[in-house]
Amino acid sequence: METLKSKIIDRLILVILVILLITMVAYIIFLIVPINVVDFKEVKVQTPIIQQGEDLRFHLISEKYVGVVGIKECSFRDELIHPLSSQLTNVGIGKHDDIIQIDVPKSLPADNYIYFCKFTYKIFGRIVIEEMETDAFQVVEKQ
């Protein structure tokens, strides 16, 4: 009777150890393998020359794979970074083909810029950062 109980306990301990080992391996793989939340396939400026205070328009084709809310931090960049306010982003899962319109501040100096955005997502305690930038465009003084 004792040997039957000890065999059952031994097998139960073995099953628990195997489950723990599988869980640890899965967790290590989760930490090593990069997570792709969104893929920016095409970002093309439609208004290559704009006046201060007007709207920058660009065509954005993207695909979002994971339904999580992120933080979007954008800026206009030349040699300096001209930050815009941060905001939450909650774009749905799937393919997106959009025309994006951004207000260019009247105070933005005339120069060549790119529009850059950093998206920060938190997935199961892991921070995932995705970045997007447009091609160059020119801001000219308002006439």
Image (tube, rainbow, N blue to C red):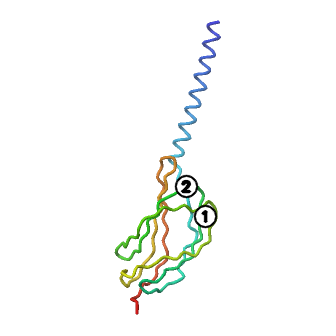
Q: Position of residue 16 (x, y in %)?
A: 58, 26
What residue do we see at 36% from left, 72% from top? 81
Compared across the picture, whether 88 is left or right of 13 comes to left
Asked if residue 26 is positioned above or below residue 136 in the image, the reply reads above
The numbered dot on residue 105 is none
**Label 2 residue SS:** loop
Up-down: is 129 above or below 110? above
136 left or right, relative to 90: left
Residue 71, percent across and down? 47, 60
Between 107 and 136, the one lying in front of the other is: 107
- For image coordinates 58% across by 55% down, the residue present is 67
Q: Residue at x 54, y 44 (%)?
A: 29
Q: Tell me the quarter of the image containing the N terminus.
A: top right
Q: Of the residues tagged 2 and 1, which is closer to the observer?
A: 2
| Placement of 5 over or under 26, stated as above or below | above
Relative placement, left or right, of 48 versus 141 is: right
x%, y% of residue 106?
39, 82
Cα distance in 3D space between marks 2 and 1: 13 Å
Residue that lies at the very extreme toward the bottom in this rendered image: 143
Q: Which residue is mark 1?
A: 63
Residue 68 tag number: 2
Image position of 2 with respect to 107: above or below: above
- Name which residue type carries label 1: Glu
Quadrant location of residue 63? bottom right
Q: Amino acid at mark 2?
A: Val
Q: Nearer the viewer, residue 108 or 59?
A: 108
Picture quadrant of residue 97: bottom right
Q: Earlier in the sequence, mark 2 or mark 1?
A: 1
The C terminus is located in which quarter? bottom left
Compare residues 21 and 46 and report the one nearer the observer.
Answer: 46
Question: Crowding at label 2, few (<14), some or many (≥20) Cα neighbours within 10 Å?
Answer: some
Q: Are marks 2 and 1 in contact (CB under 8 Å)?
A: no
